Image (cartoon, rainbow, N blue to C red):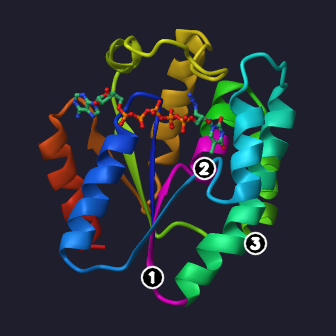
């Protein structure tokens, strides 16, 4: 089973990811934990370029970068794990590209989808947990961070487009929307219920 956690930055993805891994491990489930962009040595190298705030990177280049990392990630980590019937839990996947580079930066969604399909070779998440919350709540949580990365430094209007894009994508039956304003333990409980019943 392939489960993806999505949401705007500061929505609590990493926190939920950690909670789910602990819970799955306690239940003796064999889980492969990964993230995008990244998940492989090549992907992590691309990630550091992608997030580098000293670089100027246009939206189309961003899309190529994340999909280059993704092609390696799918081939090296995700596809082999799924072939062994392992549970894969991934922090961000193709919805991030559609939400950030598509809804956020205005790239053509159909063209982006084709690029994503080529990178994944048709591997799709079985379940996508979208943590939704208002931009200002997420921003307040990130205020403690000393330096924001290249994407976090975008303005609120951009992040609002990303949030609305995510909600649009979440109309598909593979998605479940979680209320990101809930306390961490409630969010974990809701996510756990969705995974257990999928
Ligand atoms: N990106 C893209 O543009 N296109 C793509 O295709 C892909 C990615 C794959 C990756 O950043 C960036 O790449 C991302 C999109 C872009 N943009 N940005 N920025 P990343 O992986 O480094 O960062 P992130 O994914 O945005 O994660 P994050 O900033 O670390 O946020 P988070 O993981 O969602 O939140 P968190 O770290 O779990 O929690 C944030 C704080 O809130 C923390 O202090 C927690 O203790 C607190 N928290 C968490 N949950 C709660 C609840 N429930 N209540 C109260 N407080 C909470």
Say which label, 1 or 3, has the lower sequence index: 1
Q: Which mark is residue 86?
A: 1
- Whether residue 122 is visible here, answered yes or no, is no
Classify 170 as above or below 8.
Answer: below
Pick the quarter of the image with the N terminus: bottom left
Q: Which residue is mark 2?
A: 36
Classify 54 as above or below 81.
Answer: above
Could you say where residue 132 lies in the image, as x and y percent from the top left? 35, 35
Q: Where does the magenta region start and end?
A: 84-98
Q: Which residue is mark 3?
A: 121
Could you say where residue 29 lies in the image, as x and y percent from the top left? 29, 79
- Side of 129 relative to 79 (left or right): left
44 or 65: which is nearer to us?
44
164 or 78: which is nearer to us?
78
The residue positioned 56% from the left and 11% from the top of the image is 157
* Mark 3 nearby-residue class (10 Å; few <14, some 14–19, many ≥20): few
* CB at disc 2 and ligand 1 closer than 8 Å: yes
Q: Secondary structure at mark 1?
A: loop
Instruction: Please tell me whether mark 1 or mark 3 is closer to you in this view.
Output: 1
Say which label, 1 or 2, has the lower sequence index: 2
Q: Secondary structure at mark 2?
A: loop
- Side of 48 relative to 36 (left or right): right
Disc 1 versus disc 3: distance between alpha carbons? 19 Å
Could you say where residue 12 lies in the image, as x and y percent from the top left? 34, 36
Figure quarter occupied by ligand 1: top left
- Whether residue 168 is visible here, answered yes or no, is yes
């Amino acid at each position: 089973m392939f489960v993806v956690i999505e949401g705007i930055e500061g929505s609590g993805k990493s926190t939920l990811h950690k909670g789910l891994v602990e819970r799955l491990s306690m239940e003796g489930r064999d889980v492969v934990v990964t993230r995008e962009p990244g998940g492989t040595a090549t992907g992590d190298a691309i990630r550091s370029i992608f997030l580098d705030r000293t670089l100027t990177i246009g939206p189309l280049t961003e899309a190529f970068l994340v999909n280059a990392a993704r092609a390696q990630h799918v081939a090296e980590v995700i596809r082999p794990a799924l072939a062994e019937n392992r549970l894969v839990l991934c922090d961000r996947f193709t919805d991030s590209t559609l939400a950030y580079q598509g809804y956020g930066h205005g790239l053509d969604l159909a063209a982006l989808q084709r690029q994503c399909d080529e990178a994944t070779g048709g591997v799709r998440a079985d379940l996508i947990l979208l943590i939704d919350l208002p931009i200002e709540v997420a921003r307040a949580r990130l205020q403690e961070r000393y330096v924001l990365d290249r994407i976090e430094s975008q303005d609120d209007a951009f992040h609002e487009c990303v949030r609305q894009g995510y909600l649009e994508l979440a109309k598909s039956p593979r998605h479940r929307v979680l209320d990101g304003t809930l306390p961490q333990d409630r969010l974990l409980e809701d996510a756990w219920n969705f995974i257990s019943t999928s």
